[in-house]
Image: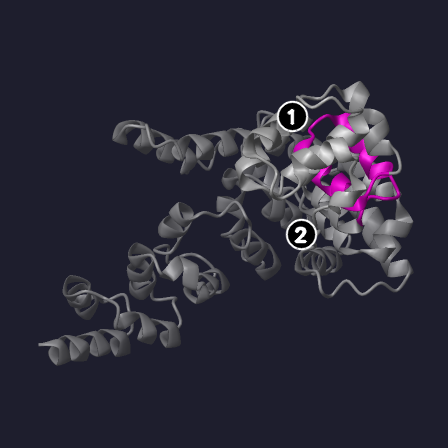
Amino acid sequence: MSMEFEREPLAIDSFPPNLQTHVKEDAPAKMKMMAAQGMVPAPPAQQVLVLYQLHFDEQFADAAVDSLAGMPPNVLQPLVAGDQQPSVLDWMAEVLEDADLLEALVLNQNTDDATIYQLAGSSGGEVGEIIANNQVRILRSPAIIEALYKNVDVRMGTVDRLIELAQRNDVDLSPFPELTAALKGAAAGGDDAGLSEQEFSKLLDDQSEKLKEENEALKQLEDDSLTRSERDKLEKELANDDDDADDGRDRPMRQVIADMNIAQKIRLATVGSREAIKILVRDPNKLIHMAAIKSPRIKLGDVKRLSSNKSLPDGVINYMAKNREWTSDYEVLVNLTMNPKTPLSEVTGFLKHLRKRELQRLSRNRNVSHQVSRMAKRLMKRRR
């Protein structure tokens, strides 16, 4: 479940006459750009409103964002903490990165729950703790709990406390898949203590650093100036399959995961790095491997490698086969068709998309069922 604030432009007549000439729809582009660059004399409160108004115009949006981000924190502090409009606060939450400003924004009662939801999923641990302390808001919008759960910087104990709060107040958590999985995992774990809260928090801190490295590598991959060899090297680093990788505490990740309880494994599968997910996606527990394959860290390149793996749990293969975005890639489609664990109902639909060479391979493949190889032969004959 996702929450998103729908911003709307302010009424033009809410601006002083001297600023209306910069923000009204038919204002000259030069006047708008001057205002978007913060070059119009006005008090900071009015200046922020001008920048907010101009961020709706694609031509001046980048300049408006840069101007807001460049304003001194001591100038912005009373604006994010004061009597500000929810839509303006939502925009400021998207642009600003200063932790003190975000904390003030989170504490502002005018800040909309949808804005808090976005911050709960993206901000650092200190901001997350402040969000978690507002029980009235949490009970009003329990989706915020799920956003905090999916934030690697938020402690497990904090999330557990909020889930207990929701349960005590009879809040229905069934619309939130990650929380539902967490509750089932906690129930299935019984008395298994797993890692201590301190150990698990340390692990999540290490994962947070690895996620930053992964994100940086993904950004580099988007650079069109990369050479083929540079791109291949980056992709190889991202696809590192070293199961004995260090988790930051001189213990291989596989060993650390083995010491976790089910609830901790599900949380790590939801917020962890590729290194952790590639281990957890093989876990025999359905709650764990399904949380891993649904992780936002799973990219198409990962699916290409996983889709040919015959040792993965049936639920993982089935989930990949039903994901139309992934199966629109031909390599994934072929891998799943050749994988004996792929449900026959899905393979039947995939066959018609295969080229002659892959149909020939499939017709001779002894790993797939006789029914699949026979269908491949029939399809080849019909095409002839």
- 281 vs 72, left or right, is left
- 43 vs 229, left or right, is right
- 81 vs 125, left or right, is right
Location of residue 130 (image quadrant):
top right
Location of residue 210 (image quadrant):
top right
Secondary structure under badge 2? helix
Q: From what the image shows, is residue 270 above or below residue 73?
A: below
Q: From what the image shows, is residue 222 above or below residue 41?
A: below
Q: Which residues are magenta?
A: 84-112
State the residue in front, 70 or 342: 70
As drawn, the label of residue 272 is none
Residue for point 13% across, 76% down: 383
State the residue in front, 158 or 366: 158
Foreground mark, 2 or 1, reads 1
Measured from the top left, where is residue 92 in percent x and y?
72, 35
Amino acid type indicated by mark 2: Ile
- Outermost residue to the left: 384
Q: Is residue 124 visible?
A: no
Q: Which residue is mark 1?
A: 67
Measured from the top left, where is residue 56 in percent x and y?
62, 43
Neighbours of disc 1 within 10 Å: few (<14), some (14-19), many (20+)? some
State the residue in front, 93 or 75: 75
Q: Which residue is mark 2?
A: 262
Total residue callouts: 2
2 or 1: tag closer to the N-terminus: 1
